Image (cartoon, grey):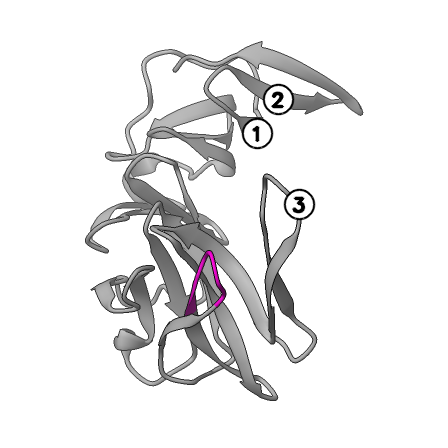
């Protein structure tokens, strides 16, 4: 998610539904530990990571301005901020409370989209590759590229609680998010969305639900 001069974020009291605060120029991405975090617009194509108090909207911390920055949620108390800076320190995992860098992503990942599995792993995809990164430390766990070990990376459709769901050459597959190994139970379908209870599958423009395995 990128910040812009037309962005605006609101703090709304869930009990009274009253607007408690307004932050023009802030594109909020993540909420955690009493802080709303997003990209604050500074000038055209330039923004800065910004944390505001969830109750009042008061600024708590501000990061350095970054050209063409992108921010995504990366865990319950972490956001990922990436920009086209020189060097690999431009792809960071920031603490939402302080704005300090908890860790850095592996080299060469700035153009790769990643999804948090709601457990401990960021699953990242680009082209014919799937990569997994520890959400707390930024450590590369495994990568699967076309032709590696005689395997073909699946087309990833969903990640949830340690599982990577997708479509492989032979049909639906599920990988262990921490190791990249095939899970022992072969799935019946390819879900687009998974929760604690069900996986939603779109087939011939019809939406079906299947029980989730955990």
Cα distance between the residues tagged 3 and 2 = 31 Å
In screen coordinates, is 191 left or right of 207? left
Tell me which numbered mark, 2 or 1, is placed earlier along the sequence. Answer: 1
Is any part of residue 157 visible from this angle? yes
Q: Judge by depth and name the residue closer to the eye, 63 or 173.
A: 63
Q: Are marks 3 and 2 in contact (CB under 8 Å)?
A: no
Residue pictured at 66% horizontal, 45% vertical: 17
Q: Are marks 2 and 1 in contact (CB under 8 Å)?
A: yes
Residue pictured at 46% horizontal, 54% vertical: 30
Quarter of the image where the C terminus is located: top left
Quarter of the image where the N terminus is located: bottom right
Tell me which numbered mark, 3 or 2, is placed earlier along the sequence. Answer: 3
Q: Which residue is mark 1?
A: 193
Q: Which residue is mark 3?
A: 17
Q: Quick one: label 3, few (<14), some, or many (20+) residues within 10 Å?
A: few
Cα distance between the residues tagged 3 and 1 = 29 Å
Which residue is outermost to the right?
A: 205
Q: Residue 16, position in %: x, y?
A: 64, 43
Q: Judge by depth and name the residue closer to the eye, 195 or 29.
A: 29
Is any part of residue 1 visible from this angle? no
Residue pictured at 45% horizontal, 66% vertical: 111
Cα distance between the residues tagged 2 and 1 = 5 Å
Which residue is outermost to the front?
A: 16
């Amino acid at each position: 998610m990128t910040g812009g001069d037309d962005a605006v974020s609101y703090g709304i009291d869930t009990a009274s539904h009253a607007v408690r605060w307004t932050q023009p120029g802030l594109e909020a991405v993540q909420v955690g530990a009493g802080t709303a975090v997003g990209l604050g617009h500074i000038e055209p194509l330039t923004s800065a990571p910004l944390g505001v108090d969830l109750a009042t909207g008061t600024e708590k911390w501000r990061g350095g301005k970054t050209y063409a920055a992108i921010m995504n949620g990366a865990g319950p108390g972490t956001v990922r901020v990436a920009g086209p800076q020189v060097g690999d320190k431009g792809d960071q995992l920031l603490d939402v409370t302080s704005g300090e860098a908890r860790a850095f992503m592996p080299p060469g990942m700035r153009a790769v989209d990643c999804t948090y599995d709601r457990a401990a792993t960021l699953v990242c995809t680009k082209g014919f590759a799937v990569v997994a990164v520890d959400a707390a430390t930024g450590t590369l766990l495994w990568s699967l590229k076309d032709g590696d070990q005689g395997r073909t990376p699946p087309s990833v459709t969903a990640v949830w609680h340690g599982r990577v769901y997708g479509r492989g050459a032979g049909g639906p597959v599920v990988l262990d998010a921490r190791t990249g190994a095939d899970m022992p139970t072969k799935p019946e379908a390819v879900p687009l969305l998974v929760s604690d209870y069900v996986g939603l599958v779109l087939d011939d423009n019809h939406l079906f639900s299947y029980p989730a395995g955990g």
